[in-house]
């Protein structure tokens, strides 16, 4: 069994990006600038955004964090997005999800300039991804592809089962694993909360990508020998033995499933760090396109 070490690979990717940023500086070019907008005080969201800003500093990007109160209206948030769209100094930006209930997430995502949409959530970018065109791939699925690539995990002709059909993980993942090329060329089954007999489906899978957010959902009896297991889930589970009062738990019963798997991602240290690394990669791409368009 091989651990797909997202922490190690994400550090390699950050080093590669930092080298590219140093070269940009030597050439006297502007370095990439990522902005992040967060609405409200959700603890997990603040942690994620903090990690993204720190990652920007680590590779030499400029970063801007815009914090808005929980009471922000949709109109006010759309005005912030318009300003970021028009700010030539910003190469890419993200709006941290989830948003408070008074704001329509879809309206917000559609207001982001597709050329600055480094999360890859805008319908234009999602459509391009589905059509195999060059675009920003959502960071979590992009990170999973990169992990499979760097560990040379065979995907061609394999049966990939994706659990969860969210717009940010499961749905794009199912499209990407079925695309022509590597990683891809899989036969994909996309499962969700209405799927019947899910154990029957997962136990036939060569590759399982679990993104539902239910701690320890995937048990050893749901997995065949030598399967590749990608655990996207991040849940906070109360744990009095931890200083913070909770532990971070994936969707997979790691202790037992890892005994059967050929490759498996840990939680934490698997898909999570890859997501941040690929957001940086998308921001670098946004900077390169921005420069090319301004010539
Ligand atoms: P989401 O929007 O909450 O969607 C969950 C999906 O799981 C839905 O499609 C739902 O089906 C499906 N589902 C729920 N219960 C199920 C069941 N018993 N059997 C089969 N499918 C079931 O989730 P998300 O935003 O994709 O996030 C999923 C998990 O990944 C969360 O723990 C989140 O924190 C984590 N996450 C991690 C990263 C990372 O960087 N590692 C990034 C993003 C998300 P329906 O569509 O039928 O409701």
Image (cartoon, helix red, strand yellow):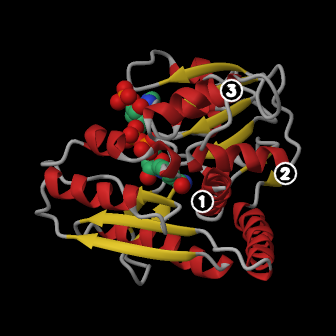
Q: Give the side of residue 16 with respect to residue 209, left or right.
A: right
Question: Mark on residue 132?
Answer: 3
Quadrant (top left/top right/bottom left/bottom right) for the C terminus: bottom right
Residue 105, position as x, y percentages in the image = 27, 43
Q: Residues within 10 Å of mark 2 (few under 14, many from 20)?
A: few
Q: Is 222 in front, or is 5? A: 5
Question: Mark on residue 150?
Answer: 2
The residue pinned by badge 1 equals 283
Q: Which label's residue is closer to the chain start, 1 or 3?
A: 3
Q: Residue at x 77, y 42 (%)?
A: 261
- Kindly state the secondary structure of the residue where label 2 is placed: helix
Q: Quadrant of residue 23?
A: bottom right
Q: Is 184 in front, or is 106? A: 106
Question: Mark on residue 115?
Answer: none
- Kindly state the secondary structure of the residue where label 3 is placed: loop
Q: Which label's residue is closer to the chain start, 2 or 3?
A: 3
**Residue 275 vertical placement versus 41 (above, below):** above
Q: Disc 1 beta carbon < 8 A from ligand 1?
A: no
**Residue 198 vertical placement versus 155 (above, below):** above
Depth check, mark 2 against mark 1: the one in front is 1
Q: Is 99 in front, or is 7? A: 99
Instruction: Estimate the spatial distance between the alpha carbons at disc 2 and disc 3, rounded to whole Å.
Output: 21 Å
Q: Residues within 10 Å of mark 3 (few under 14, many from 20)?
A: few
Instruction: Estimate the spatial distance between the alpha carbons at disc 1 and disc 3, rounded to whole Å.
Output: 20 Å
Q: Which label's residue is closer to the chain start, 2 or 1?
A: 2
- Kindly state the secondary structure of the residue where label 1 is placed: helix
């Amino acid at each position: 069994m091989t651990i797909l070490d997202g922490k190690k690979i994400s550090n390699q990717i950050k080093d590669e990006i930092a080298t590219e940023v140093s070269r940009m500086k030597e050439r006297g070019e502007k370095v990439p600038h990522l902005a992040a907008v967060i609405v409200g005080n959700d603890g997990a969201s603040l942690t994620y955004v903090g990690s993204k800003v720190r990652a920007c500093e680590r590779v030499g990007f400029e970063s801007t964090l815009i914090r808005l109160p929980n009471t922000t209206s949709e109109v006010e948030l759309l005005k912030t997005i318009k300003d970021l769209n028009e700010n030539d100094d910003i190469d890419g930006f993200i709006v941290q999800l989830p948003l408070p209930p008074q704001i329509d997430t879809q309206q917000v995502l559609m207001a982001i300039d597709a050329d600055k949409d480094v999360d890859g959530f805008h319908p234009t970018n999602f459509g391009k991804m589905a059509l195999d065109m060059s675009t920003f791939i959502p960071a979590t699925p992009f990170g999973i592809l990169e992990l499979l690539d760097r560990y040379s995990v065979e995907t061609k002709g394999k049966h990939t089962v994706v659990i969860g059909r969210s717009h940010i993980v499961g749905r794009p993942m199912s499209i990407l694993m079925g695309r022509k090329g590597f990683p891809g060329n899989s036969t994909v089954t996309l499962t969700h909360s209405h799927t019947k007999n899910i154990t029957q489906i997962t136990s036939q899978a060569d590759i399982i990508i679990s993104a539902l957010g239910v701690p320890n959902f995937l048990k050893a009896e749901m997995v065949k020998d030598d399967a590749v297991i990608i655990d996207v889930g991040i849940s906070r589970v109360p744990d009095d033995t931890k200083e913070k009062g909770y532990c971070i738990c994936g969707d997979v019963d790691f202790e037992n499933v890892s005994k059967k798997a050929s490759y498996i991602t840990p939680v934490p240290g698997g898909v999570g760090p890859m997501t941040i690394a690929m957001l940086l990669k998308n921001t670098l791409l946004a900077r390169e396109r921005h420069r090319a368009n301004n010539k």
